[in-house]
Every structure is written in structure tokens, then in C-alpha cells.
Image: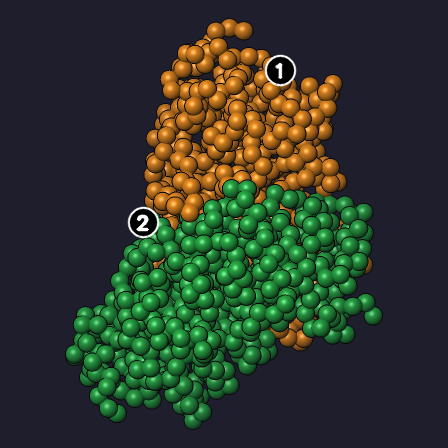
Chain colours: A green, B orange
Amino acid sequence: MTEDHLHRIRHKPLRERVVSAEEAASLIRDGMVLGMSGFTRAGEAKAVPLALAERAKAQPLKVTLMTGASLGNDLDKTLAEAKVLSRRIPFMSDPALRRAINAGEVMYIDQHLSETVEQLRTGQLPPVDIAIVEAVAITETGGIVPTTSVGNSASFALLAEKVIVEINLSQPEALEGLHDIYIPTYRPTRTPIPVVTPESRVGFPFIPVPPERIAAIVVSTKLDSSSTIEAPDAETRAIAGHLTEFLKNEVAHSRLPGHLHPLQAGIGTIANAVLHGFIDSPFHDLTMYSEVLQDSTFDLMDAGKMVFASGSSITLSAPKYRDVMARFHEFKPRLVLRPQEISNHPEVVRRLGLICINTALEFDLYGNVNSTHVMGTQMMNGIGGSGDFARNAYLSVFVTKSMAKDGRISSVVPMVSHVDHTEHDVDILVTEQGLADLRGLAPRERARVVLQNCVAPEWRDALADYHDRALARGGHTPHLIEEALSWHDRLRRTGSMRPE
Amino acid sequence: MTEDHLHRIRHKPLRERVVSAEEAASLIRDGMVLGMSGFTRAGEAKAVPLALAERAKAQPLKVTLMTGASLGNDLDKTLAEAKVLSRRIPFMSDPALRRAINAGEVMYIDQHLSETVEQLRTGQLPPVDIAIVEAVAITETGGIVPTTSVGNSASFALLAEKVIVEINLSQPEALEGLHDIYIPTYRPTRTPIPVVTPESRVGFPFIPVPPERIAAIVVSTKLDSSSTIEAPDAETRAIAGHLTEFLKNEVAHSRLPGHLHPLQAGIGTIANAVLHGFIDSPFHDLTMYSEVLQDSTFDLMDAGKMVFASGSSITLSAPKYRDVMARFHEFKPRLVLRPQEISNHPEVVRRLGLICINTALEFDLYGNVNSTHVMGTQMMNGIGGSGDFARNAYLSVFVTKSMAKDGRISSVVPMVSHVDHTEHDVDILVTEQGLADLRGLAPRERARVVLQNCVAPEWRDALADYHDRALARGGHTPHLIEEALSWHDRLRRTGSMRPE
């Protein structure tokens, strides 16, 4: 090993703690709880978990793995296949791990992303034995400077018995100064979280861990995985168009200013495409207060549309990553990365009055949204931060294409098969067909605008027929309870929601 | 009319605005939006809405009625039967109005109670034409001093074009000084809400309305209706016992201090009984940060167990009301009433780390809670503040008896027929059978503790059988989607969930 890494460990006594990934992984014992960096494929520790998976081949062991959110570099796949995971908290998006979760082999605790560390610090989740945090540097005082995400890393490191730091030499040192590490004070004597604008800086630019708790330092060079979002298509462009028109109308009616309110957008192709659509909008001086900063954030900055973005991670496509890092000095003054507890905090979300755009798997006539479970049973990814944002939003928008699987599935159904966001938390629904504004409407009225505006033409009659027959039976939220989930049952049996 | 009321109108020019209820009601025109005081049968305007209902007999008209929450004095019944209501926001609990809502005659917008005025001040709900607010007095500057509730009265009065004040001579003048009227600043430049303890006083003791907007003053003498809660029975005592044992264990494990955290309890017999149970507990120096202060609050104060209570209304049984008002000077220093936006604010709820106890209509194997809809269709009352509290609680507890209708209904079902609180927002479930601690558990594990601890013995086999067969099919949240709502369908067809 060369000595290249040493200048990144500015607390000199800690330089003696540099060990191999295998040695660091040997600190992990069967039954432990690990708190690892990593949020939506950004900034996860890489070397130690891979060494752990390798070791498990000869020496089986099980751990509870907590992270910020999903991991890149196939780590969840590798760990799941090595059967190292007994319990996974609070988010994932890997197909192999998903299979293990749905088979009941891994216990998955699907949580609001702002809540994990609250439960941890109050002893309502089992304590973290070892935190494993990717860093670009360790400061003179032993402070850990994270890389492309903050996630839950700060609280994991502060609460864990021992900390393993992975210094990633491929992550540019210019990232230092990007982060704002603020930890809320203990309840019930907590003081207000002082974030009052997306730009607010209220904490340290590093995680202030006592150096003696850093048990091992590993040097790595593996890059983050690129984001998997797809390019906008005609349908996502239509969704973006409907939402832009709607927001222009809100501005015209003085319900929003021309720079809108700070924006939040969920991870994924559709939400990214919607934000992309703002490049051609009349909105200006936009800000973001979101979890994940995707390609669209930087494209909006380059287009002169966005002035500042706050997130908990930066997750980019490969070309965008190269471009952003090459001119990081241009973006850095307009960015901050925060702990996910702060990026997603109900207090701050409500205070800033966010416009929140999240993706639905399906929604129903009355505006209930399912964003996690296929056919009410099979976990896709998890609720992530969507609940933190949608509940407290100024405007809570959910987007989806009106159909899936070549039209065999309608994303608009009589009753969702699982509820993540209740009718109370959903203001606006958008598909490529159009936009339903549910604000101030009773369930029967909501059904009318959903039917008119959001449903694919080939599914409209069937859904209207269900609603008419339910209306005849009455009720505040009319349903034919014996038939409400029949579309999902048909899908399960025949692979299509279409009548047999 | 005597002149008794005049000293209560301390702003002398306003004394000229005193008119009859009929004259005041004549300001109301067809199609208007009314914002009225009243929160859980406390402090509603009484004379003007009754005059309005009377007038509608000869001269039909329709209005949108917004309040804090439910109304006493059969006002919702009278207004519904007079067919005055086209739209009702955000909560009600009257059987006659419920029938009209379920028949689709009144459009009911069932909202989180902290959110109505947010939507109102941002123009996302139609503007209030006339606010009608019950008061004990009008100050020298024209400030309105509310009576037994604050609810949404302050924002209604501040946002309405005109204000009608009902000076209620039966409400004791000693109520003045009880209220703390704080209105959050506008978003997105809002500053933190400065409430940091249940005791925090951060606003005015009156609603600071410009006197010229007070269009009419009416004098009334009708008392609030008494609360309808029933005395604790063996089952509610058992629920209280399970919860007390659980909390003692949390204290023993240092997850809670001996004075617990501030308590919130939903309105109703079970939640009141649970609080009552704390009289015989070892907990001490308790505080409340809740919506409604019920009999149990004052009993806990008298028992030396509770030191302070913050709410948005005081709703008492008839004997307790007489007792409390007779020695109000003893209680007043230990009470504050706030706008429901503040009593229920996610920011404050999360900050204070509340222990929240709310009532479920039914819950399912996986911890999803229905608190509003019978058989997924018929509205009972509304979600009220339960969502504001449960989502942001330190500990979110839902209580219910394990069976209803003489055992024909199990309150624990395979899948709830309507979701108000998702699995993510529910920590603890309690029935008279026992308590399920769902924290940190995956759905399959939750199902096991729910089956073991919460289900009535006569329903346990049927529910375990459902779960076993669902498990065989797999999935993160195992369900037989074709059978998940069959218990509710049977209830609909036969009046019982029992197999035919």
C-alpha cells in the first residue's frame, strides 16, 4: 500500500489504525448490529461489507444491517446471497435482497427515513455495535468528512460502540465543506431545528466523533454505482407537462410565487423527468430541499433555473457524475448535504412548505397511494422518504404512468392493495393522461376527477362501472367491498387485471 | 335585553354592534363559507347557527361549514336536518350529519386537524366569508377571548372578511388568560414555532382581530354540551393495565423517565379510561400536550399525578364541568389552550416526543389501523388529530376492545377495510387481551405478536388460519388478496364476521 492516503487522515495518531478491509471486517461478530453509510447508491462503505461477505463463505454469520437507504455496488445483493443479513433497516432496492425479503429469509423493517435514528437514540431499536462510514478525510480533531451522502452516517457513528472509517481515495477531496452535520437535541427538551431555508447551515462540516472510538481505518478506491434512471420518454414528458401547467396556474392565481416553493422529488425516472421538465418552464430561482440530488438538479442549475439544492445524497448517471465532479467548484457553493433526519424532518418539511413530487406504484379512485407492495404482498423497495415529505408538504404530488406491463395493469384501481399514503396526504395525482387536483374534495368528488383525468382510456369504463355500482350502495367512500381487490386477484391469477 | 353583557365588551365602540342572533345570521348568504368556533363539543358558536337553521326553513340556503372539530348542542344535527350544509370540514361526530354524509348529501372533507388552516391561508381551500366565534369577552383593543376551545377560531377570525362574535354570558370570565394564540408565519419563510414544552406561552391571550372587522356581536347563554364518554369498564381497565405495565417496563429499561413524556390522548371512552388508569400508576409529574382535555386530565391533577396540560379544548362530563369551573383558579395556572394547528403541529409533536394514545376502529395483523370507516365505506367521525399525533409520536399507541357488537365483529382483522394509519405509524397495539409491541419488527413478526397478544380467543384460530395460508403463499406482507376483505363482506351480508 502506498502512503497516498495518509494526508487524508489529518489526525495523526489515527494513521496507526489503518488496516486491511479483512482485518476491519474481523471486528464484526455474529449477531451484531451494523450502521453503515450509504443513501440511494451514494457514499456507502464498500470494502468492509465485501470483505464481510467473503468471510461469511467460510465462517457463516448473521447481522442486522442499517443504512441510510439503498446501496450501490451490488452490496445488498452480495450480502443477501452470502446470507449475512438477518434484518435490514430502513430501505433497499436490490432485486436479490427483495427476493430474500419476500421469501421471509430477511426481516425487513420498512421505515420513514427520518425516523430510524430517532428510534435508535431512544433505545427503541437495538443499539449499533459498529458503524462503517465512507469518508473523504478525517480532520485534525478526528472528525469524519463523508463522501457523496450523509444518510444516517452521523448518528450511526455517534451512537455506535466502534467506528470503522473507509477513506475512499476516488472520492474527490473537494467534497469537504459540502456537508452540514446537525443532530437534534434529546427529547422531550429538544430545541427547534434551526433550518429555515434550503441554504441554512447549522452544523459541522464533519461528523464530530471522539477519535478513540475510531477502531479501524480502511483505504478504498471503488466509485459509487451510477444511477439507474432512464431518459424521459413521451409519457414522462406528458406528466411533466401536466404538472408544469398546473403550477403555472397556481402562480397565476397567486397561490405560489414565480420561484415556486422549495422542491422535493423522489428518486427514479419519473420524478427526475418531471424536474427535467422545469427546464422549459417559466419558473425561475428554484430551490430544492430533497433527499436525493439527481441529474435533473444539476441540469436545472446549468439551465440557470435553480439557485440552490439541499439533499442527503448526490446520485448521478455516469456521464453526469464525471461532468459534475470536473467542475465541482461551480456547484459547491449552491449545495449542501444533510443527515436524512434533517433533509426529511417533518418540522423542516412543513416549515419550508415544500412542493413534493413522489412516485406511486398505484393509486385508487379516492386518492390513496400504494408505493411499496405489488398485489398487496410483494415488497418492491420501501416507503423511503415519501411519507416524511407527502404528509407535511405544501403540495403533495404523486406521479405514475397510467398503465404498466404493456397495459395489463392499470395504475388506477378501485382500491389500492396496500396503503402507504392515505387520502389525507395526497393533493395532486398525475399520469400521462392528465392531472387530478384533489384539494378540498370529498371522496365522491375525487373519484370523478380521477376518472376524468388520470385513467387510461382502455380502463376508464371498467373503473367508472365499479364506481357507479359502488355509488348505488352508498357510503362516504363508496366501495363494493367484495370486489374492491378483485383487479389485483385477477392479476395474481392471470397476469393481467383484464376481465377473463 | 339587560346590559349585563356590556362590561364584557371592553372596546366601547363595539358595543354598538350588538344585534340579535337573527340579525347576525342575516349576514350569511347562500353559498358562503363559514368558519365557526367549536372543538369536540366545546366552545362552539351557538345562537347564530341555530338562527341560521331556523331561517333556512323559510328561506333555503347552503353553506360550507368549517369548524375546529365536532360541535355540541346538536348543531350539526340541526344544520344537517335543515339542509343548510353543502360541505363540512374537517371533523364531525353527529349521527344525523353522518347519515347525510354517507348518503352523499353533504360533501365531507375529512382532514388532519392541523392542516385545515394551512390550506386556508394559502388559498388551497375557498376563503372564509364569515367567522363566527364564541367568546367570554372582547378586550380593550378588540381582541376576542375564546371560551372553552380555540380550535381553528383564531385563523378563521383573522382570515375572514367579517367576524361575528357570540359573547356567552354562561362561560365564566375566569377563562380569560387561559388561551395562547400563536399563528405560524407564512411559508416558505416561516420561523420555528417557539413551543418547546407543554407550558410554553408564545402568543396572545386573545385573538387579535382589527375591531372594524367585527361585523356583529350576539349575546348568548347556552352552555356547552357535556361529554358523552362512558365510565371505565372491565375491558377498558384491562387496556389501561396492559399499557401501564408496558410503560413501567420502558421506565425500568431507561427508555422513558419516571414522569414519562408529555401525553396525548384521543377523545373518547377508551382513551379517557387509559389516562384514568395512570391515577394508580407509579408515574408522577405527568404533563399533557393534547387536543382535548377530558375528565381524566383533571382527575390526574387532583390525584397529584399531573402537573400541566396543554390542549385545544376542555370537554367534560356535566359533574366534572361544575367541579372544575367552581375551582377554576386552582387549575388555571396549570392549563393552556392553543389553536389546533399548534396543539397538533407535527413540528411540536415530534419535538416534544409525545406518547400518543388513540383509538382504533379496527387494526390488522400487520399493524395498519382504520379509525374512520365501517366496512371500508361508511364514515364514522373522521381521522381528527390522530394522524398528526401518531405519525410524529415518540410512541404511537392505538387502543381498542378486541371485539364489537357482542362478539360478531373482531376488531383485529386480516386486512383493514380502510387505512388511516399505516404500519409505519403504529408502535403499540392494545386490546383488553394484551399488548403488541411492534417496534423494530417486520410484518411477519408483527403478525405473530398481534395473534399472540391482541386477538379475542374466539377469533384467534380463524385469524391464525388466514395468516398460515397467506404465509404459504409468501411475500413481505403475506395476504390472500382474494380473501383479505372477506370478513368485512360477511359482516355486510350477514351482520357478523363469523363464517356462515
Q: Quadrant of residue A492?
A: bottom right
Helix, strand or loop status at disc 2: loop
Query: Image height check: is A442 above or below A225?
Result: above
Return the chain for callout 1: B
- List the residue tagged with mark 1: B22
- The answer to whether A76 appears left or right of A103 in the picture is left
Nearer-the-camera pick, A278 or B237: A278
- List the residue tagged with mark 2: A191
Return the chain for callout 2: A
The location of residue B456, given as percent across then percent down, is: 63, 57
- The answer to whether B233 appears left or right of B140 in the picture is right
Query: Image height check: is B13 above or below A87?
Result: above
Circle number at residue A467: none
**Amino acid beneath label 2:** Thr
Q: Quadrant of the C terminus of chain A?
A: bottom right
The location of residue A93, given as percent across then percent down, is: 52, 74
**Amino acid beneath label 1:** Glu
Local packing at callout 2 (Cα closer than 10 Å; few below 14, some 14-19, many 20+) is some
Helix, strand or loop status at disc 1: helix
The residue at 23%/86% (across/down) is: A4
The residue at 40%/14% (across/down) is: B10
Nearer-the-camera pick, B110 or B253: B110
The residue at 50%/38% (across/down) is: B121
Local packing at callout 1 (Cα closer than 10 Å; few below 14, some 14-19, many 20+) is some
The residue at 18%/75% (across/down) is: A11
Nearer-the-camera pick, A97 or A314: A314
